């Protein structure tokens, strides 16, 4: 909950008074041509209006009308490992932070590092995504924009998240397994091929592409900047 | 993120102008005794100051100084089933909502109903509490007060939550198993005695009382109102 301090009201009172008294004094002088009258009226006005202005400010601080919160939303990036989810999500996060928004970044790798024992079976993956979705929905409900990047391979879990949230934007970061394997930014595909990792989405575990994604970005054909622009343009309506 | 609309600034401009012009016109009249001069100066002042006041407001809306957020905290109620956690927590929640605070209520029963497959082994209980704690800490970080009521029987999990949060207030709702069983608000103790429920905290599953709770309320000796007052008094320092 935000509120305004008394010091802020005092400073506003002073800044306005300096400004306003110069105008009043000048006006009285122009129309009466009497410098003493102008200064006298200006002086008395300054003192009594300062007091009134301060209480006018404090009264308005109790009035909620016209104080608005930016409409929060949950921006959910889904796609294979190496598709570019985190990179684009980080870009959107930085963009929103610079705009002064309250925003939380949830990333698959980071959240899994907090809960290292989360498994990779269909049930465990879905429970994990559902819990993250619940978390995202509570943040959204309390006025925080959420930028999530999770492989989130199953439609069922993503649908659950969508239902929990008020404004759910599903971004399908599309890139073929071949393209992702060529990039292999974390060296995971290499480990899968050597048999070090099992149940890896796209290789020996399924990925269900979103049926009705809000936005699709194809990082095999678009640059990261182009993909970012596409997402950025879409979220503008929530920021105004 | 909160911001002020232009309509709010326009209304403030008008309300101040009505007020201020009456003062200026009266002052000029008192000192010049010329009603035409007083009205003329008042009129011109009204028009040009309205414009200046509006831009003064818009400029101050861009200045963050003196805009403060209430310091959020995580109020964590722990204790046996039937000790009175939810009742006191609900009271604190209502109190904070009435004060206009942004506050989220997390309750063991409610959260478990969202994730019905959460088990009751030590490991599963702790994972559950840790995930809820992570959620609470993110809400707190984003300016929301969190009121949690969970049996949360293990010190380890509660310590994990404490570490994640900035302002963690551990409220130990103390009442003996006998007292809780006598109350048995949800009929759970009855089901335990009939063998319908297993691994029930306090009966056939351990409860580790907090080593260093921030607040202890003994609902066997204190009324709910007295317990509520105790918690209410403690959180005052965060609300000013």
Image (cartoon, coloured by chain):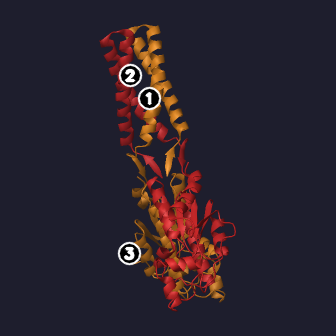
Chain colours: A red, B orange
Determine contact: label 1, label 3, CB under 8 Å: no
Relative to residue B152, is residue A48 drawn left or right?
left
- The mark closer to the camera, 2 or 3, is 2
| Image: A37 above or below B14 | above
**Where does label 2 land, which residue?**
A23
Instruction: Tell me which label, 1 or 3, sits earlier in the chain.
Output: 1
**Where does label 1 land, which residue?**
B52
Residue pictured at 54% horizontal, 55% vertical: B97
Q: Position of residue B208 (x, y in %)?
A: 45, 82
Q: Position of residue A39 (x, y in %)?
A: 31, 17
Q: Position of residue B4 (x, y in %)?
A: 51, 43
Q: Looking at this rendering, what residue extends furthest in the left direction?
A: A36
**Where does label 3 land, which residue?**
B212
Q: Chain of mark 1?
A: B
Residue B169 is drawn in which quadrant?
Answer: bottom left
Q: Looking at this rendering, what residue extends furthest in the bottom direction?
A: A195
Relative to residue B1, is residue B112 drawn left or right?
right
Which type of secondary structure does the marked residue at label 3 adopt?
A: loop
């Amino acid at each position: 909950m935000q509120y305004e301090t008394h010091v802020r009201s005092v400073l506003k009172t002073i800044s306005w008074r300096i400004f306003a008294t110069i105008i009043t004094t000048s006006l009285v002088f122009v129309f009466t041509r009497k410098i003493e009258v102008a200064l006298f009226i200006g002086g008395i006005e300054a003192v009594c209006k300062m007091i009134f202005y301060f209480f006018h400010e404090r009264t308005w601080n109790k009035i909620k009308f016209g104080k608005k919160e930016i409409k929060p939303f949950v921006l959910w990036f889904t796609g294979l490992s190496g598709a570019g989810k985190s990179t684009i999500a980080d870009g959107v996060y930085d963009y929103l932070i610079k705009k002064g928004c309250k925003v939380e970044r949830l990333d698959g790798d980071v959240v899994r590092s907090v809960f290292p024992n989360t498994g990779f079976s269909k049930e465990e993956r879905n429970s994990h995504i559902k819990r993250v979705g619940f978390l995202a929905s509570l943040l959204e409900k309390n006025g925080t924009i959420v930028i999530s990047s999770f492989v989130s391979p199953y439609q069922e879990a993503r649908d659950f998240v969508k239902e929990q949230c008020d404004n759910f934007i599903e971004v399908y970061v599309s890139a073929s397994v071949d393209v992702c394997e060529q990039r292999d930014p974390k060296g995971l595909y290499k480990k899968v091929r050597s048999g070090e990792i099992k149940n890896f989405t796209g290789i020996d575990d399924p990925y269900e592409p979103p049926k009705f994604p809000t936005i699709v970005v194809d990082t095999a054909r678009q640059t990261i900047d182009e993909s970012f622009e596409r997402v950025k343009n879409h979220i503008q309506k929530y920021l105004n």
